[in-house]
Image (tube, grey):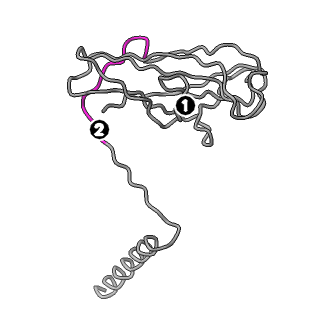
Amino acid sequence: MKKQVTQLMLALMGLSVAPMVFAQAAPGTGQVTFNGELIDETCVINAGDEDKTVTLPTISTQSLTAAGQTYGSKMFDISVSSCPASLKSVAAHFETTNMNPDTRNAINQASVSKAGNVEVQLLDRDGTTPIKLGSTGTFVPIDASGTAQMSYGGQYYATDKTTAGYVTAIVRYTLAYQ
């Protein structure tokens, strides 16, 4: 019995090692290593900035007639305070479960009379540089009093000729630090 168990263990070890060696040596394969850090300290998101509503301007579908066109931007701020002295800069890291994987913009989630072929694209603090969902905006310094103000924006983004209707997109953010 002991001999059978030993043979079975050797056979299983051989099966589990062989595919791993093969996968490492096979052409067309690769590896992704994720590194990161979690810290205990954080800034406080100021009241009113933890759950923002940004109203984009009402525009004509004639402003968005082809894929890739953008229009109707609106900037917004996220302010933080009570930042520990050990933190030097802060930025918002944007995510959503309702993302177009091709554009990495937020998908229109309007529940009634939904506009067609339009998404919401995030903008960095300069108001022109797109922030793809799953990315972090530009870091801003935290001042000596432990406060900082981050500015971002949103705009309509056409995936094709747009059709009239409502647009609603929800994006989550987490504070990121340097």
Cα–Cα gap, marks 1 and 2: 26 Å
Q: Is 170 included in the stretch rendered in magenta? A: no
Q: Quadrant of the N terminus?
A: bottom left
Q: Give the residue at the far left of this rendering.
A: 85
Q: Type of residue at label 2?
A: Leu
Which residue is pictured at 30% across the width and 88% down the height? 3
**Residue 77, position as x, y percentages in the image:** 45, 16
Which element carries disc 2, helix, strand or loop? loop
Q: Residues within 10 Å of mark 1 (few under 14, many from 20)?
A: some
Report the residue marked by disc 2: 38
Q: Which residues are magenta?
A: 37-49
**Residue 75, position as x, y percentages in the image:** 53, 17
Which residue is pictured at 43% across the width and 56% down the height? 32
Q: Quadrant of the C terminus?
A: top left
Q: Type of residue at label 1?
A: Pro
Q: Nearer the viewer, residue 80 or 178?
A: 178
Q: Left or right of 153: which side holds 36?
A: left
Q: Left or right of 150: which side holds 40?
A: left
Which residue is pictured at 46% across the width and 71% down the height? 23
Report the residue marked by disc 1: 130
Q: Is 39 included in the stretch rendered in magenta? A: yes
